[in-house]
Each structure stands twice: as structure tokens, then as C-alpha cells.
Image (tube, coloured by chain):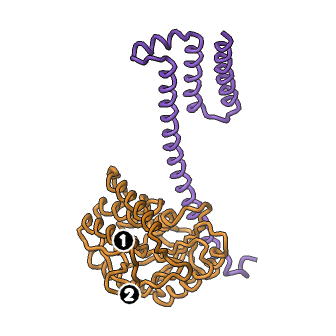
Amino acid sequence: MSGYWFALALCLVLVVSLIQLLRRRRIREKYVALWIVVALAVIVLGAFPDLISGLARLVGVQVPSNLVFSVALLFLLIVCVQLSVAVSALEERTRTLTEEVALLRAEQTADDQPDETPDPADA
Amino acid sequence: MTIEPSAVDLDSRTAVGPEAEGGSAPSGADGRLLVIIPAWNEEETLPDVIAEVRRTGPQWDILVVNDCSRDQTSVLAHRAGVTVLDLPINLGVGGAMRAGYKYAQRHGYDYTVQLDADGQHDPAAIPDLLAAAGAGSNIVIGARFAGKGDYRARGPRQWSMRFLAAILSRLTGVKLTDTTSGFKLCDRRAIGLFAVDYPAEYLGDTLEALVIAHRAGLSVAQAPVAMRPRAGGSPSHSPLKAAVFLGRAFFALLIALSRPTRRLARSIP
């Protein structure tokens, strides 16, 4: 029985800390939404373990916990791949910005230099 | 090559360019040419390379793309009076070159030539590349192993280079002997393409770029050139490194070939 409450408490901690991160703007909501859904699902399943047993029987998995493990693994894998995609997109963006910054700088020096040569007129 | 105190600041700067050539120097046989030198920590060789390019072709413009060097590369390039793109983040050769192509495109250059800052590429070969481009090619590779020069790769590295050359020759329908050469001339269409789509990955700027160009309908040719030994460091001939090289090259090629064709950049005329 104590294990039950322990699991439930962990889920609650997860949800609270996610909301906290969101409140402090450390995560954008489009990323946090996913995790809140996961946390809520875990709470529901933790509170009613029979749900998992039923589900396991339905899809033909003999040990219910194995169903939880495999679904969790698959889910984490998908999230990792998705993050790799997001990082690649970010790299492409920084690359483009880097190019633009360099081009702007070069343009600026090109604009400045003609002014530097006819010095006496400026003073 | 020096900046003239011209009265052209107010109208469109893209048309002017940093080194407005007030019509004085007649540029190459058929158009303005920009020599792009990607440089990363090349303070030892860069000034000589710039000087040599100027001696060989005073009518060419020079652009040094400083890929976030930690040494005096940028300072020396500025001092030499050439245009410098200082990348605030290190992007690698491919990244530096795409920035260079963007510059060339915005300033309306007809041709670009990529020239290594380590002095490996001889600017005296640029007219040969131009001649080949004049014969109707969009991209001309300055190629080793094509009759000129005595550079020889040996052992496994040579085999893998030959193997890659064979694959790309088949693909493009032109005999290519040196697909990993960085010494490349691009015309307007190729500049327009590479300003948008030029891989920054390992070997992406050579092998994959050729695949991209071929897929975009550009024609590739090569001109035999002699390459000089690099000023510093020597290419490795260890079998293990050659194997890694081949593996990565093959992988890059495979990915490049299986990629869905991107829509062509609208900017290509």
C-alpha cells in the first residue's frame, strides 16, 4: 500500500515542478503541454492500477508492468528524436543569423571607410 | 582593389559593392569574379595568398570569410584591404562558403572561385577554370589527378577518392577525377543555388554540393590543375583514417542521393 502512495506522490511532484518551470518561463508551453499530459496519465494510471491490467489484457501483454515500460521507452525515444530535429532546425537558424551578422558587419565597414579617408572635411 | 572615396553611398549598396570598381579595371574576360577565401586560423599563410591572388588577377575582387579564428587572421585580412566577413560563430568550411555565396549573390558577381587560405590552390589556374565555365558549365572543379601536377594520393585514400570520383562521374555524366577538391568556380546559377543550399557537414561542401548542383540541373565540369603541398600539416595515409574517410564520404553521398529534391531557389535566374 505504501508503494502506491509513493508512486502517486512522485507523479504529483512531477506535475508541480513542470508547472513551476512553466510559470518561471523556463520552458515554453508548447513543450510543457506534452509533459503535463504524461504526468496526468501517470497519475490516473497510478491511482487506478486496474486500468493498466485491463489494457495489458486487451493488447495481449502478460505482465502489465511490461506494457508500461515499453510504452514509456517508445515515448522517450520519440521525444529524443523530436528534440534532435528541433536542435537541427535551431542550428540552421543560428547559421543563417551568423551569416547575416557577418554580411551586415561587412556592409557597415564598407560604408564607414569612405568617410574615413576625407578626414579634413569632417572635422 | 582599394576602396575609392566614391560618391555612391546613397543609392543601392548591393549594386555598388564594397569595392566599387569605378569602371577602371576591366574585369575578367566575361564578368566580375570574386575570389572567396574561407579562413580559419590561417594567419601564417593568408597574407601571401591574398598578395598572390592580387598579382595574378588585379581585376578580381577578394573576399575573406573569417570563420571565427582565434588568431590574427581577421586583422591581417582587414589590413590587406580586402573585404572580410567575420563570422561570429565557427561554422566550418561549408558554413563559411555559404556566407560567401550569399555575399556574391547580393553583390551581383558573375563568378566565384573558392580558394583555400593555406596556399594549396594556385590562383594562376583560375583563368583555366574561367575558360571551362565559358564553355558552358555552371561549376568547374579544379581537379588533381587529371594530368597536371604531381600530387598523388597513395594507398587506401587514393582508392576511396577514385571510388567516389567514379560514382559522381556516373551521376553527372562527366568524367571527374577529384570530387573532394575545394578549388571550385561557380557561375551565377550555381551561386544562387549555393547561397541557399550549401551543406555545412563534413564533406558536404564538396561531395554533397555536387549532388545538389546536379539535381538542380546545373552542369559540372573539371579543369586539371596542379596543387601545391599544404603549407602546414600533411594529409594522412593511415589505413584507418582512410577507412573512416571513405565511410563518412559514402554515408554523406548516400544521404545526399536519397534526399528529396528541394524546390529550387526562386532567386535563380
Among the chains pictured, the one given orange colouring is B
Question: Which of the 4 quarters of the picture holds residue B160?
Answer: bottom left
Using the image as rendered, state which of residue B115 and residue A38 is in the foreground. Answer: A38
- The chain holding disc 1 is B
Q: Chain of mark 2?
A: B
Residue found 52% across the figure and 33% down from its top: A76
Which numbered marker is on residue B149? 2
What color does chain A have in the rendering? Answer: purple
Give coordinates of residue A25: x percent, y percent.
67, 34
Q: Which residue is mark 1?
A: B161
Report whether A42 appears left or right of B167: right
User: Please, is residue A61 above or below residue B47 in the view?
Assistant: above
Q: Residues within 10 Å of mark 2 (few under 14, many from 20)?
A: some
Whole-percent x and y of residue B154?
A: 40, 78
Residue B49 can be seen in this image? yes
Kind of residue at disc 1? Met
